Amino acid sequence: MDLIINLIACAIIFFLGISFGWQLRERMAERVVKKFLADIEGSEDLKDNCINIIIEKQNDTYYVYDKENNSFMGQATNRKELEDVLASRFPGKRFLADSDNLKEVGFK
């Protein structure tokens, strides 16, 4: 008789554990999806603040051009100065260059 009661108690505890774990998993999945959707919305704002650039090096001077319309954006003699020039001329913007272009000019 005690064996049957113990088995029933273990079965009840087992199913309560499964139920609790399942609900906890559902809550975590909801959090992940909400965070993912918020990141997607944030990335759209990020796209508005990004400028695709091309960097060229000629005689120890770096020149930066807007990739979309080839307009001149700035020049400098090293990477730090170039970053400072772009940040001062275009505050709040981020600049994206292809990894091949960065290798070509020696920044990567």
Image (cartoon, rainbow, N blue to C red):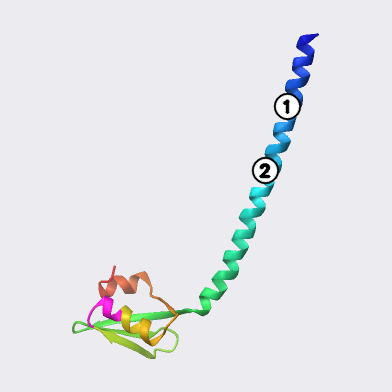
Left or right position of 70 against 34: left
Residue 22: x and y in percent read 70, 40
| Residue 105: image location, x then y, percent | 26, 75
Q: What residue is drawn where x is 28% and y is 71%?
A: 107
Q: The disc labelled 1 sits on which kind of residue?
A: Ile
In the displayed structure, does residue 77 sit left or right of residue 50? left
**Dot 1 alpha-carbon crowd within 10 angstroms: few under 14, some 14 to 19, many 20 or more:** few
Residue denoted by label 2: 24
Point out the stretch of residues depicted in magenta: 77-82
Left/right placement of residue 65 relative to residue 47 reads left
As drawn, 53 above or below 27: below
Disc 1 designates what residue? 13
Q: Which residue corresponds to the image point at 36% horizontal and 85% vertical from the top-left?
A: 88
Is residue 35 shown above or below 63?
above
Q: Are marks 2 and 1 in contact (CB under 8 Å)?
A: no
Question: What secondary structure do most residues of the magenta stretch adopt?
Answer: helix
